[in-house]
Image: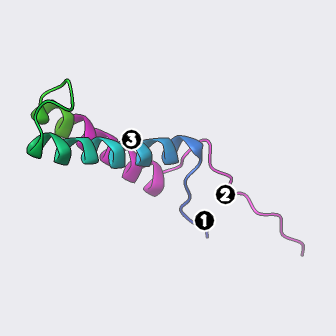
Amino acid sequence: MERNALGWFGWFSVAGFVILTSLFVLDLFADALWAFSAFWTLVVAIVAGIGAVALYAGEDPTADTYEETTA
């Protein structure tokens, strides 16, 4: 049975989600810190989160899911 895994591409998407969500929260409290609107920052953060979940649940092409087994 194959396990779910994240490669560097999936971790990049997770990092984008975390950073953009943090920027969205900061933008709610301090409007002048981030150049983009809070709405579009949230939209891009949601897309990054969906991508991270899709890469985790699907097959991340950069993940090393193959394990050496001996019979």
Question: Sequence order check: which comes first, mark 1 or mark 2?
Answer: 1
Relative height, residue 47 to residue 6 (above, below):
above
Q: CA distance from mark 2 to mark 3?
A: 23 Å
Q: Report x, y in % for residue 39.
A: 10, 35
* Quadrant where the C terminus is found in the figure: bottom right
Pick the residue in front: 37 or 26.
Answer: 26
Circle 3: residue type: Gly
66 with respect to 22 (left or right): right
Considering the numbered disc 2 on the image, is that residue within a helix, a strand or a loop?
loop
Circle 1: residue type: Glu
Mark 3 — residue?
Answer: 16
Front disc: 1 or 2:
2
Mark 1 — residue?
Answer: 2
Segment tinted magenta in the rendering: 44-71
Reply yes or no: does residue 38 show up in magenta: no
Mark 2 — residue?
Answer: 65
Q: Report x, y in % for residue 41.
A: 20, 34
